[in-house]
C-alpha cells in the first residue's frame, strides 16, 4: 500500500519530496489536482492519480500548464481545495492566467507547486519561478526538508483561504527527487460540495463574479493580501535560526540550500562561528524577523540556487533598516562568492565559508585525488545521452537525415521539447538546428517558411511530439497554414509523454486516473486545419524516406507527416521483443565493407556494438529491444532478424 | 530501534550505474531495509535522463541523528555499489578516498561513443587494477551473469544489494530484504528477487 493512504498513526515512512508534497495536499483535504508533466515535478500528480478513487480526488494531466491552472482555479472558485503542479518553465506558460488570477483572487484554498531544476539536470533552461511570486504579487513558500515539503503544502491551502489568493510553493530537483523521513499527519474525513456563487454584487469577494476588474480596486486588494501575508510570515515556524546569538557570519538560505549550508557548517566545525537563518516564507519577506537576525552579524552570506532572489530582497530590507541593524557586508551571487549558475552542493558552500572566514578547506588526500581523476579520465569513457534501444525516434531521425541528404538543398529541422530533443547530442543524428520551448519547432519553422522572398530557399522541417502537439504546437500550426508557410511538420507520435515517464495526453484513450476517455485524433485535427496529412510507420525506412522526400518537394503550404510507433519503454512494448536480432559473422565483412560501419558509426543503437577484436558488429543480447530496424540498414544483410 | 551501530554517522553509500539498470530501485530497497532498522535515511538521486544512456547516481545518507544533505560532500563516500564497472571509477574520482569500500558489477554497458568506435572501453583487468588501487576493499561481482541465470539481466541490481549484505559491511539479512520486497511484490516475482539477493550474498560471504 502506498504511504499516501497511511492513516497517519504517527508512522514515519521514507518519502520522495514529491510524495511528501502529494501527502501534504491529501492531509489538507485537496480534491482536484491538475498539471502538465515536467521533470522534476511529475511524480506529485502521478502519486495523487493512484489514490484518486480512495481519496475522492479528480486528477488530470491537462494539455498545458495554463489550462491546468484554469482547471484548478475553477475548483477553487467553487469552494474546493485545488492543486496545480508544473516545472519551472511551465509557470511561464501559465503566467498570463496567473496574473489575472492574482487579480480575481481565489476562494477554496489553491496552491501552485513549481519544481525548479537548478543546474538543468533534466531541462533545456535554468529557469527561476520565484520571480513570478514577486512580479505577480503572490505569497511564496520554499520547503527546506522533506518534513516541511509535506507540512508546508498542507499549510499552504489554509494560508490561501485565509488570504483569498493562490499560494506558490517552490521545490527544486534536490528536494523533489530526493527522499527523507516524514512523520505523517492525519487524513481528513470530509466530502465537500462544489458550489459556485456568482450572482452577488460585482465587488463581493464571496458571492460576486470572479474577475480581475475593476483593475485598480482588485490590484489594491491583492496588495492588501500580500501585506497580510507579510504579517503572518513574521511568526511562521518555517523560518528558523540555528547558531550562536552573535555569529561572525550569518547565512541566509532556503530550500535544498539550507541542507547544504547545515552540512557545510557541520563539516567545517564552524557551529560556534556561523549562524543559519533558514527562510521558508520567501515572498513577501517578513521585515521584522529579518531585522532581528540581520542585527546579529555584520557579514551576511546568502546561499540560494538560480537567481539572487532572496539576496536582492534581503538587501532591500537591510538598506531600509540600515539605521537599526547597521551597515552589512553581503556575500552571495552578486559578488561571486556563490556561483551565478548551476546547482549548489555542500562543497560549494564550504568553499564560500572558508573564503569569507579565512579558514583552510579540510585537506584532501591530493595524491589519491590525482590518481582517481586520472583513472576515471582514462578508463571511464564519457557517457553521452542516446536514444534507447528500439526507440522510434532513432528510426525517424535516420529517415529524416537520409531524406535531407537525398534532397540535397540544405534542408534543416526546427527542434522541440521531448525525448526527440536528444537528436542534438552525439548519440543523435544532428538534424535539429533550432531548439527552444514547447511547440516552438513549428512556430520557428512557420517563420523560416516566410523567408523565401529574402533569399532563404532551403527546405524547412519541424518535429514535434504527440503530447507537445497538443501542448503548444497547434496554434503555431494554424499560423503556418493560415500564412501558407511552406514547411513540413513531422509529428513523432510515440503514444505517450515519454520523456517524463509516460503520462497520458489527449491523443490517448485514457486519462491520468486510468479511466477511458475519448482520444483526440492528431491526423484529423491537422486535416481539419487545412494541412496535407500522411501517416507512416518510421520502422518502415524506405517508405518513410520516400514520403519525406515527396513532401519536401511539394512547394504548396503545410505538410504534416505523422510517424506513428510506440515508445520502446511503453507498457505495451517494454520487455517484449518483436524480433530476435543477431549479426551473421559470416556475412558481416567488417571494415572491408564499403559501408564503413554504417550500423555502429551512424545508426548508434546502444545494443549494436562494434567488436574491436573480431572487427565485426555484434548485437548485445541484454540491451536489444528487438525492433529489427537495424536489419534494414546493413548493405550485406548481415544483421538478421527472426520473429520472436 | 536505533540499536544498529554505524561505523560513522552519517554513513555514506553511493549506488551508481547507467540509466535502465534499476539504480533507483536498488537505492529504495537498500534504504527500506535500513529504515526498518530505525535509521534515518536521506536519498539524493540524479536520474533525469535515466533511461537514455546517462550515468545515474543515488546518494544514501544513513544516520541515527537526522536528515542530511541529499548530496554527499566530495571525497566522503564510505561505500560505492556500482552496477557498471566504469561508473565505479567515475564516482571514485569525485567521492572516493583511500578508505572507501567498492562493490562493482563486472558487466560493462558501453557508452554511445564506444559503440561508434570513437572511444574505447578498457578491459576489465584494467578497471580492476584501478579499483584495487583506489579502495580499501574491493569485490568484483558477476551480477549480470547471475541475473541472466535467474531469468532477467535487470535483477543485477538486486544481486548487487545482496552482495553488499553478504559482505557484512552493514548487518542486512535475507529476512530484512524479504520484508521490504513483500510490501510491493508477491508470488513468483518476490521469489526470483529473493533468489537474486541470495545469489549476491553468496558471492561476498566471508
Image (cartoon, helix red, strand yellow):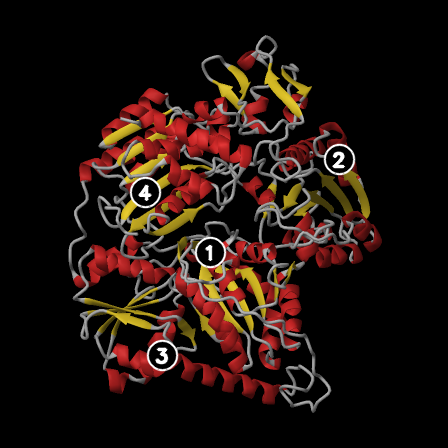
Of circles 4 and 3, the one toward us is 4
Residue A110 on image: x %, y %? 57, 72
Residue B157 on image: x %, y %? 43, 34
Are circles 4 and 2 on residues that touch, CB within 8 Å?
no
In whole angstroms, how far apart are the C-alphas of marks 3 and 1? Answer: 26 Å
Q: Would residue A267 be found to the left or right of residue B38 on screen? A: left
Of circles 2 and 3, the one toward us is 3
Q: Quadrant where the C terminus of chain A lies?
A: top right
Residue depicted at 22% across the width and 32% down the height = B136
Q: Chain of mark 3?
A: A
In whole angstroms, how far apart are the C-alphas of marks 2 and 1? Answer: 39 Å
Regarding residue B43, the answer to whether it shows in the image is yes
In whole angstroms, how far apart are the C-alphas of marks 4 and 3? Answer: 42 Å
Regarding residue B156, the answer to whether it shows in the image is no
Residue depicted at 45% across the width and 81% down the height = A229
Q: Residues within 10 Å of mark 4 (few under 14, many from 20)?
A: many
Q: Earlier in the sequence, mark 2 or mark 1?
A: 1
Are both tags, 4 and 3, on one chain? no
Q: Earlier in the sequence, mark 3 or mark 1?
A: 1
Number of disc labels: 4
Q: Name the residue beneath numbered marker 3.
A: A316
Q: Is residue A258 above or below residue A75?
A: above
Tell me, for residue A549, which label it has, or none.
2
Q: Residues within 10 Å of mark 1 (few under 14, many from 20)?
A: many
Residue depicted at 57% across the width and 61% down the height = A90
Q: Earlier in the sequence, mark 2 or mark 3?
A: 3
Q: Quadrant of residue A563?
A: top right
Q: Name the residue beneath numbered marker 1.
A: A117
Amino acid at each position: 500500500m502506498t504511504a499516501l493512504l497511511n492513516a497517519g498513526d504517527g508512522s514515519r515512512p521514507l518519502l520522495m519530496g514529491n510524495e511528501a508534497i502529494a501527502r501534504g495536499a491529501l492531509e489538507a483535504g485537496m480534491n482536484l489536482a491538475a498539471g502538465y508533466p515536467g521533470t522534476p515535478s511529475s511524480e506529485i500528480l502521478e502519486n495523487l492519480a493512484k489514490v484518486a478513487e480512495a481519496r475522492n480526488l479528480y486528477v488530470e494531466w491537462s494539455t498545458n500548464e495554463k489550462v491546468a491552472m484554469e482547471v484548478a482555479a475553477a475548483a477553487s472558485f467553487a469552494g474546493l481545495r485545488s492543486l496545480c503542479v508544473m516545472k519551472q518553465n511551465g509557470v511561464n506558460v501559465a503566467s498570463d492566467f496567473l496574473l489575472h488570477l492574482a487579480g480575481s483572487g481565489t476562494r477554496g484554498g489553491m496552491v501552485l507547486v513549481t519544481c525548479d531544476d537548478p543546474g538543468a539536470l533534466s531541462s533545456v533552461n535554468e529557469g527561476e519561478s520565484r520571480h513570478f511570486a514577486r512580479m505577480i504579487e503572490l505569497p511564496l513558500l520554499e520547503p527546506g526538508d522533506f518534513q516541511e515539503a509535506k507540512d508546508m503544502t498542507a499549510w499552504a491551502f489554509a494560508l490561501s483561504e485565509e488570504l483569498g489568493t493562490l499560494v506558490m510553493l517552490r521545490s527544486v530537483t534536490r528536494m523533489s527527487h530526493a527522499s527523507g523521513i516524514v512523520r505523517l499527519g492525519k487524513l481528513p474525513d470530509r466530502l465537500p460540495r462544489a458550489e459556485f456563487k456568482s450572482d452577488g454584487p460585482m465587488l463581493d469577494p464571496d458571492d460576486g463574479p470572479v474577475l480581475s476588474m475593476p483593475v485598480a480596486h482588485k490590484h489594491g486588494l491583492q496588495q492588501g493580501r500580500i501585506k497580510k501575508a507579510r504579517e503572518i510570515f513574521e511568526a511562521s515556524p518555517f523560518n528558523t535560526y540555528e547558531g550562536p546569538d552573535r555569529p561572525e557570519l550569518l547565512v541566509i538560505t532556503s530550500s535544498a540550500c539550507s541542507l547544504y549550508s547545515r552540512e557545510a557548517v557541520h563539516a567545517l566545525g564552524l557551529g560556534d562561528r556561523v549562524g543559519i537563518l533558514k527562510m521558508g516564507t520567501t515572498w513577501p519577506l517578513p521585515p521584522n524577523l529579518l531585522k532581528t537576525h540581520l542585527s546579529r552579524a555584520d557579514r551576511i552570506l546568502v546561499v540560494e540556487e538560480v537567481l539572487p532572489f532572496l539576496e536582492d530582497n534581503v538587501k532591500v530590507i537591510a538598506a531600509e533598516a540600515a539605521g537599526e541593524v547597521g551597515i552589512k557586508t553581503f556575500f552571495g551571487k552578486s559578488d561571486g562568492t556563490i556561483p551565478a549558475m548551476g546547482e549548489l552542493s555542500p562543497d560549494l558552500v564550504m568553499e564560500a565559508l572558508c573564503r569569507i572566514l579565512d579558514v583552510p578547506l579540510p585537506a584532501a588526500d591530493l595524491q589519491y585525488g590525482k590518481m582517481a581523476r586520472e583513472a576515471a579520465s582514462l578508463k571511464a569513457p564519457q557517457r553521452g545521452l542516446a536514444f534507447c534501444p528500439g526507440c522510434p525516434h532513432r528510426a525517424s531521425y535516420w529517415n529524416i537525415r537520409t531524406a535531407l541528404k537525398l534532397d540535397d538543398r540544405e534542408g534543416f529541422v526546427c527542434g522541440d521539447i521531448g525525448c526527440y530533443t536528444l537528436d542534438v547530442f552525439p548519440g543523435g543524428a544532428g538534424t535539429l538546428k533550432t531548439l527552444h520551448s514547447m511547440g516552438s519547432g513549428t512556430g520557428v519553422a512557420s517563420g523560416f517558411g516566410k523567408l523565401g522572398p529574402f533569399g532563404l530557399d532551403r527546405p524547412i522541417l519541424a518535429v514535434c511530439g504527440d503530447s507537445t502537439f497538443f501542448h503548444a504546437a497547434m496554434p503555431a500550426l494554424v499560423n503556418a497554414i493560415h500564412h501558407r508557410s511552406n514547411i513540413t511538420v513531422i509529428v513523432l507520435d510515440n503514444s505517450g509523454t515519454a520523456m517524463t515517464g509516460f503520462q497520458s495526453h489527449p491523443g490517448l484513450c485514457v486519462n491520468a486516473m486510468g479511466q477511458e476517455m475519448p482520444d483526440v485524433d492528431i491526423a484529423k485535427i491537422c486535416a481539419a486545419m487545412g494541412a496535407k496529412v500522411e501517416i507512416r510507420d518510421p520502422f518502415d525506412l524506405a517508405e518513410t524516406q520516400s514520403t519525406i522526400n515527396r513532401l519536401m518537394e511539394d512547394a504548396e503550404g503545410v505538410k504534416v507527416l505523422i510517424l506513428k510507433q510506440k515508445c520502446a519503454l511503453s507498457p505495451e512494448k517494454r520487455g517484449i521483443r518483436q524480433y530476435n536480432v543477431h549479426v551473421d559473422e559470416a556475412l558481416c565483412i567488417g571494415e572491408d565493407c564499403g559501408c564503413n560501419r554504417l550500423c555502429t558509426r551512424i545508426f548508434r543503437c546502444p545494443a549494436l556494438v562494434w567488436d574491436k577484436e573480431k572487427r565485426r558488429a555484434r548485437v548485445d543480447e541484454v540491451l536489444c529491444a528487438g525492433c529489427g530496424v537495424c536489419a534494414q540498414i546493413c548493405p550485406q544483410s548481415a544483421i538478421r532478424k527472426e520473429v520472436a | 530501534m536505533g540499536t544498529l551501530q554505524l561505523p560513522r554517522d552519517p554513513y555514506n553509500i553511493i549506488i551508481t550505474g547507467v540509466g535502465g539498470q534499476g539504480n533507483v530501485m536498488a537505492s529504495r530497497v537498500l534504504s527500506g531495509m535500513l529504515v526498518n532498522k530505525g535509521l534515518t535515511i536521506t536519498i539524493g538521486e540524479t536520474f533525469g535522463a535515466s533511461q537514455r544512456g546517462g550515468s545515474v547516481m543515488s546518494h544514501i545518507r544513513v544516520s541515527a541523528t537526522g536528515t542530511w544533505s541529499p548530496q554527499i560532500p566530495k571525497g566522503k563516500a564510505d561505500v560505492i555499489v556500482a552496477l557498471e564497472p566504469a561508473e565505479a571509477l567515475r564516482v571514485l574520482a569525485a567521492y572516493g578516498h583511500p578508505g572507501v569500500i567498492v562493490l562493482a558489477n563486472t558487466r560493462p554497458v558501453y557508452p554511445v561513443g564506444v559503440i561508434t568506435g570513437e572511444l574505447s572501453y578498457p578491459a576489465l583487468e584494467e578497471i580492476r587494477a584501478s579499483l584495487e588501487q583506489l579502495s580499501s576493499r574491493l569485490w568484483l561481482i558477476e551480477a549480470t551473469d547471475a541475473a541472466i541465470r535467474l531469468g532477467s539481466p535487470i535483477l543485477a541490481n538486486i544481486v548487487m544489494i545482496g552482495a553488499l549484505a553478504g559482505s557484512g559491511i552493514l548487518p542486512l539479512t535475507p529476512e530484512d530484504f524479504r520484508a521490504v520486497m513483500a510490501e510491493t511484490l508477491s508470488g513468483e516475482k518476490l521469489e526470483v528477487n529473493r533468489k537474486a539477493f541470495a545469489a549476491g550474498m553468496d558471492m561476498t560471504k566471508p
